[in-house]
Amino acid sequence: MFSKPKQDNKVKTTATPTKKVVAPSILSVDLHITGNMESDGDIQIDGRVDGDIKSKQVTIGEGATVNGAIEADYLRVSGTVNGEITGRKVELASTARVVGDINHDLLQIEAGAYLQGLCRRMDGGEASASKPGSIPAPANSTPKPAKAILDTGMKAS
């Protein structure tokens, strides 16, 4: 008698698959790993790794040391890497110290970073399809070392 007529208040929704957000794997300052590491996710290294690393995203912390090759889609180095680096996007922070070659699609080096090695720009899929230690040179070019030019202001006589 005092009730309202029933209405269909159901909201129609379509289920969309949600991407599962996973926290990065973190190797803390006091952790020392000996051996190779491989992950489909993100890795943050603040300790020491003696071995190769392969992952989607790798962050090398300021106090971290990696002795081995690193392969990642995105790599940010703030610490020390002794080995070859392969990545689509590679960033070297001002505190980075890298001794080894860098194979990249995009490379960003902040002022103050230390780099001893060759930098090679790779074609789109080539950097991610390769395995650490087996990077082929681009088919249409040969890598050339960069020439350093030092202008001391002195003139030859």
Image (cartoon, rainbow, N blue to C red):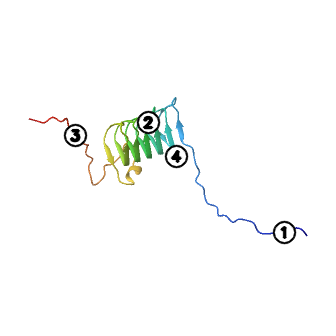
Dot 3 and dot 1 residues touching (CB under 8 Å): no
Amino acid type, residue under disc 3 in the picture:
Ile
Dot 2 and dot 4 residues touching (CB under 8 Å): no
Q: Nearer the viewer, mark 4 or mark 3?
A: 3
Q: Which residue is mark 3?
A: 149
Mark 3 neighbour density, 10 Å: few (under 14) some (14–19) many (20 or more): few
Dot 4 and dot 1 residues touching (CB under 8 Å): no
Mark earlier in primary sequence (3, 1) = 1
Residue reaching furthest top?
Answer: 30
Badge 2 element: loop
Amino acid type, residue under disc 2 in the picture:
Gly
Mark earlier in primary sequence (2, 4) = 4
How far across and how far down the image is residue 107, in percent?
37, 46
Badge 1 element: loop
Corner quadrant of residue 3 = bottom right
Q: CA distance from mark 3 to mark 1?
A: 87 Å
